[in-house]
Amino acid sequence: MEIEIDAKEFSVVTTIVAVIALILLGVLGWLFTPEGGKVLTYSEWQLHKAEREYQRELRNLQKTCEEMTALLDKPLDALRVQVAADRILNDLEKGGQAVLQPQREAVAAAAQALRNWAMGDSRERAVEAVAEASRKVAEVSDGSLP
């Protein structure tokens, strides 16, 4: 029993597969190329990656401030506030961009003040701490909270 492969058919299939692969690579390149469309060096890519991480962490801090404000706007539900504050504190322990350390510390202090409020401390201290954290986060985000 013999199997024959026609070289002409094989080259057509190979050409079609190669063209599809090139198109897919082009689409991937277009999706991942940053603004400006230039090729990045390794250090430029690291800077671009750090900027994206910075923006992501800043958005997370903004959302956390909004969540804490929402908790203060509702009547005290001690269990819900404690669980939210603990989750926020655990998230902040992971760290992040060094330049956002003052904002992380302010948000952590606000979360601790919320937790203390849930355990019977003054609501005004929690309000002040959340307002200070929101102010610090808004300073680095050009005052634009989503």
Image (cartoon, helix red, strand yellow):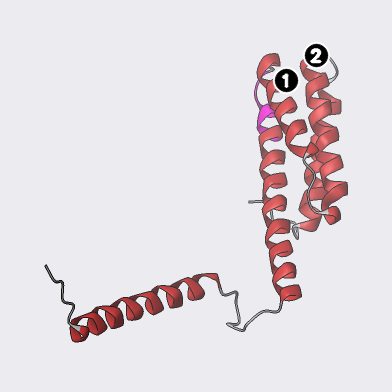
Magenta portion: prevailing SS class = helix
Magenta residues?
Answer: 69-75
At which x and y percent is residue 92?
A: 77, 38
Could you tell me if the residues under marks 1 and 2 are in contact, i.e. CB atoms within 8 Å? yes
Q: Residue at x 65, y 19 (%)?
A: 80
Q: For residue 144, which quarter of the picture?
A: bottom right
Q: For residue 85, which quarter of the picture?
A: top right
How many residues crowd around disc 2 within 10 Å: few (fewer than 14), some, or many (20 or more)? few
The magenta stretch spans residue 110:
no
Q: Is residue 61 visible?
A: yes
Residue matched to label 2: 119
Q: Horizontal placement of 140 versus 32: left or right? A: right
| Residue 138: assigned label | none
Residue matched to label 1: 82
Q: How many marks?
A: 2
Secondary-structure class at tag 2: loop
